[in-house]
Image (cartoon, rainbow, N blue to C red):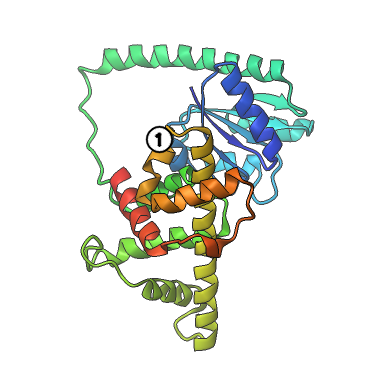
Amino acid sequence: MRFFIVDDDEAVRSMLAQIIEDQDLGEVAGEAADGSHVDTQLLRMKKVDILLIDLMMPVRDGIETIRQLNDFAGKIIMISQIESKEMIGEAYSLGVEYYITKPINRLEVCGVIQKVRERMRLERSIRDIRKSLNALLTDPPKEENPYTENSILTSAKYLLSELGIISESGSKDLLEIVQFLFHYEKEKPVEHEFPPLKEIYMNLAMKKLGKSADPAELNKEVKASEQRVRRAIFQSLSHIASIGLTDYSNPTFENASKFFDFREIRKRMLELENETKSVQSGIRLNPKKFIQVLYLEAKHLM
């Protein structure tokens, strides 16, 4: 079973992940600090079976998030310390299977997850039987073209989640860059001619402020966007380096050389290992390489 945890409390996310791993209940496929970072396509991309989601979160709460997950095929477990019967009733009406109260109790978490797993196994068995009976009576569905703006953005969100920066403010800029490159490629294949970063940032600024905006304001927005992206890339490097310190064979760490020069990863690992104060100027970042790889990897995922 693959789990995705959504809770604005990092300690709760860590506790739930530890319970799931310690009790061999499955694998935590991803985490998010708010419901605004979660959609059906992201959960589908991560092959999530069970979504554990907090009821009350600052930007988009659990109820509103579940409303947006109409096509999510997995099960949902709501988590909260609120005991409002009305809110809990609304959660159940939206498809929530079970409810876990805070503070987190290991036995309750294990018991609820086991019940949901058993129900999923039963439903899967019934579904397989029906599929076998109908196999000879139905035509195979036609495959849709996967190369769409929504699908590439979902792939990019998945990659940003794996890189540990989906919650960073710069991730929004990176997704807008992917969107820009998607439309740009319709005119020129980016594999052969990647547009200059200045052109990309200026297009983002004009989209945000309007083409008639004052040049000074546009330049100010360009610099702000550049800084947000650089901070996000640096945070991703730190995330990769921290993974490398604990699990050198982790697939995310092994694939990191696509996005970063390994010498810079190693340098950041040494800083973290020696608890050196992080200084971005001490690390050489290559935003153009990172953005290009992000876009091409998002295409490859589709």
The answer to which image quadrant residue 128 occupies is: top left
214 relative to 112, above or below? below
Residue 165 visible? The answer is: no
In percent of the image, x 61 and y 56: which residue is there? 278
Q: Nearer the viewer, residue 93 or 271?
A: 271
For the C terminus, the image quarter is: top left
Q: Nearer the viewer, residue 98 or 254?
A: 254
Q: Nearer the viewer, residue 3 or 134?
A: 3
The answer to which image quadrant residue 142 occupies is: top left
Kind of element beneath mark 1: helix
In percent of the image, x 51 and y 69: which residue is there? 225
Is the residue marked by circle 1 packed among few (<14), some (14-19), or many (20+) residues within 10 Å?
Answer: few
286 relative to 102, above or below? below
Residue 17 visible? The answer is: yes
Residue 235: x percent and y percent? 54, 53
Residue 140: x percent and y percent? 21, 28
Tell me: 211 left or right of 110: left
In percent of the image, x 29 and y 46: which residue is there? 300
Q: Which amino acid type is marked by label 1? A: Pro
Residue 2: x percent and y percent? 49, 26
- The residue at which mark 1 appears reads as 251
292 relative to 248, above or below? below
